Image: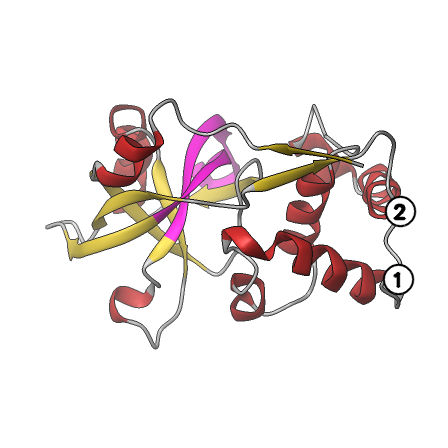
Amino acid sequence: MIEQQIDKPTNEIQAQEAAREMAVFPLPLFILPDGIQRLRIFEPCYLSMVAEAGDRGGFVIARYDSNLAFNVPKWGTRVEIIDFHSGEGGILVVDVKGLNLVNLQNMRYRDDRLLLADSYYRPFWSVATVEPGLSDMGRLLKKLFEQNVALANLYPNPKFDHLDWVCARFLEILPLSLNEKEKFIEPSMFDSLKVFLHTFIFGNENIN
């Protein structure tokens, strides 16, 4: 097992300090950096969000929660659009890829009810574990991709031998509540997540 530092932004201090106004899309889903999701867009404000995404540097997907102010927590995942096409009934189908986590401040609604916020770079897992071969979880995820064509088609270049990538994808797709998943996004929680996932999937803590 080889541990190496994850590449950081060119200027992480500026990335953390500089605010960027971004549109926020409240959704009941969980996406992490390098994760890919297919969205179906039909509301006018979100069609505008997609049209403006290139100029804004993407947009933010945040966990929908009706109990929170503006229905989202104070963090989300900045995503970029990697593909789009028209679906049935004229619905816009958009594939997005997670870029980085962000903290959200000064949330407000635009006149068209699009949620805007000042976004700040949020650190993610600080150490990536790169396996010299496929781990147990890497082999299982590869098998799941082989069995699920729709999921596999979203990832033309999967990284089954990168345990951090594998753990992130499992955290996205496992049937856990969004609140449970959120506990593992802190930079120091990667090792805890490895143990949790291996126990949840295989019933023991022996990671290999």
Cβ–Cβ under 8 Å for marks 2 and 1: yes
Give the quarter of the image for residue 164: top right
Location of mark 2 (residue):
136
Location of mark 1 (residue):
202
Residue displayed at 30% across by 39% down: 16
Which of the pair 107/81 is nearer the observer? Answer: 107
Q: Which residues are magenta?
A: 76-102
Q: Residue furthest bottom?
A: 67
Helix, strand or loop at mark 1? helix
- Where is residue 6? Give x, y as percent: 56, 32
Residue displayed at 67% across by 46% down: 169
Which of the pair 149/121 is nearer the observer? Answer: 121
- Where is residue 185? Give x, y as percent: 52, 55
Residue displayed at 31% across by 24% down: 54
Would residue 41 be found to the left or right of residue 15 on screen?
A: right
Q: Residues within 10 Å of mark 2 (few under 14, many from 20)?
A: some
Would residue 148 be found to the left or right of residue 52 on screen?
A: right
Would residue 166 be found to the left or right of residue 106 on screen?
A: right
Which of the pair 178/3 is nearer the observer? Answer: 3
Helix, strand or loop: magenta stretch: strand
Which of the pair 149/174 is nearer the observer? Answer: 174
